[in-house]
Image: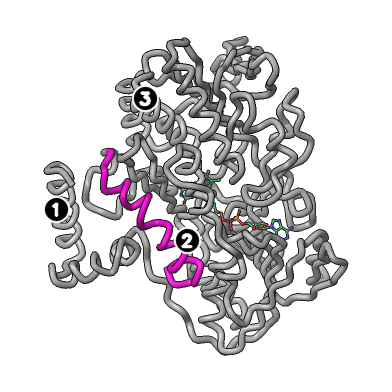
Amino acid sequence: MDKKMIEESMELIDAHLKEKGISRRDAMKLFGMGGAAMMMGSGVVTEAKAASSSAKGKILIVGGGLAGIATAALLMRSLDEPDITVLEPNEKSASYQPGQTLVGAGVWNDADTEYTTADFMPEGVNWIKEKAVEFNPDQNSVKTSGGKEIKYDYMIVAAGLKLDFARLEGLGVTETITSRGDSSAARKVVGQNGIASIYFADGATDTWTQMQKFIADAKSGKKVQGIFTDPDTPIKCGGAPKKIMYLTDARLREAGARENAELTLYPNGDKLFGVPEYNAAMIEQFAQRDMKYNFKHNLIGVDPAAKIATFKKHWLEKGEWDEDLEEYEMIPTSEKVQVPYDFMHITPPMIAPEEIGSSPIGSGKGWVPVKQETLQHVKYPNIFALGDIAAVPMGKTGGSARKQYKVVVENLIAVMEGKNELPAKYDGYTVCPLITSIGTVMLAEFNWTGKPTPSFPLDPAQERWIWWLLKVYALKPMTQYGMLSGRA
Ligand SMILES: Cc1cc2nc3c(=O)[nH]c(=O)nc-3n(C[C@H](O)[C@H](O)[C@H](O)COP(=O)(O)OP(=O)(O)OC[C@H]3O[C@@H](n4cnc5c(N)ncnc54)[C@H](O)[C@@H]3O)c2cc1C
């Protein structure tokens, strides 16, 4: 640990102690209990308080990933006589997806992120290893892939999302896949020949292989192009397309090969980050690293043999003057742009699982429509949804799910107890530990106010090594032992 690290560490500890009004002795105890415990003492992670309710009813949870298991665990702790069924077909569903970014850059291995579902499924839960394939919310029933009909009184939908590489013309992928599980439909092309994606586990392993080849080419003196895409759909972890770009930059520098590589981000949007303070910090970070960006480019096709990506570049053009509105009509305009690449990281379009998105509990856009503060379904008061599948702005991160599952449990228990008011409200909180190099992270926390909501009284737009320690050492155990057990 160098002097700068020690100073920064002390600055963080002092600021935190002052804000929380806790003694040094208590603080040392918290640090001694490990990074995860330290975070539980802060605002980043709050303890999940279990209620004690005698309310009864059959609860069905669809999806036993991060959000589904956390919800099941807290309900098991909160109800005197819990009757909970979880539908989850994947034996590895509890795996740690945020770690895939680190796998993609060779910091971790896949084994560091893969967990066995059975190790985290709460005791006492009836786990059915099948998918829900048909929803009949008017009859309170669901059909499973194995042909069972399950009746419920209350249902929680936590089925995550699917990666839709199939939408990209020319790529040759015909099926959607999940982040953990059988990826064979995509892996035959994504992870080969310079194409990479950290969004699925096998893809993250292959990203590191492809990145190393790209770096070796740059090191040999070849001038190479690396491009990074960001689609026109909502995505999980909006920071990840940029994190993998920062890490590619860091690995190229480490190899002494940065000057031979051009790195360009092609996002569909027109900002690097939705929150102005973080956006400004990132514009500066990109300039410092000579990382480029071309906004309003949506990836629509790939020619893997020729190594050419096709984007739809879009903009608004000034049309006729509108006398009534007293303004010019703005006409959406677009053109196709072809970009050659040596290495391309694809962030694929994302959709709700098809069997849910197009069912009576889905919506036109697929995501399960809920009231964004209470997370109760807009049509069915006995249904709640959370995690990546919920139609909630900015809600597709583990950090959001960590806040949402406590809201869902409190509100569901209120419904079960026959109360008219739902007491808990989700405020849109989310957190993005934006990795900016190997060793630094900008901890971007924010909510629906569109303003930074830092848990520590430190400039949130600063890249800090201590947040790297949080990302690499503390968040995983906190997820494993805190969130998946319904405690944090
Ligand atoms: C590369 C990457 C980096 C990330 N980085 C971060 C980060 O730094 N910070 C952060 O907070 N978050 C991050 N995330 C996002 C985070 O991992 C997700 O937001 C979180 O896992 C969502 O939890 P979930 O339970 O909604 O979905 P999941 O954990 O994906 O679980 C959904 C489950 O539903 C199951 N399912 C699907 N369909 C059905 C069905 N019909 N019937 C029954 N079960 C079904 C699936 O098998 C799956 O197990 C990252 C994700 C990725 C991929």
For the residue pair 80 and 447, the one nearer the viewer reads as 80
Between residues 258 and 359, which one lies in front from this camera angle?
A: 258
Residue picked out by circle 1: 10
Q: Mark 2 vs ligand 1: CB under 8 Å?
A: yes
SS at mark 1 in the image: helix
Q: Earlier in the sequence, mark 2 or mark 1?
A: 1
Q: Which residues are magenta?
A: 463-488
Does 169 sit above or below residue 163?
above
Q: Answer left or right for 474 relative to 166.
A: left
Report the magenta stretch's main SS: helix
Q: Which residue is mark 3?
A: 255
Query: Is residue 259 one of those drawn in magenta?
Result: no
Count all numbered tags in the image, as a single digit.
3
Q: Amino acid at mark 1?
A: Met
Q: Is residue 477 magenta?
A: yes
Residue type at tag 2: Arg
- Secondary structure of the residue carrying tag 2 is helix
Q: Earlier in the sequence, mark 3 or mark 1?
A: 1
Dot in front, 3 or 1: 3
**Helix or strand or loop: what does disc 3 sit on?**
loop
**Where does the C terminus fall, quadrant-wise?**
bottom left
- How many neighbours does mark 2 have within 10 angstroms: few (below 14), some (14-19), or many (20 or more)? many
Name above or below for residue 152 compared with residue 206: below
Q: Is residue 479 left or right of residue 118?
A: left
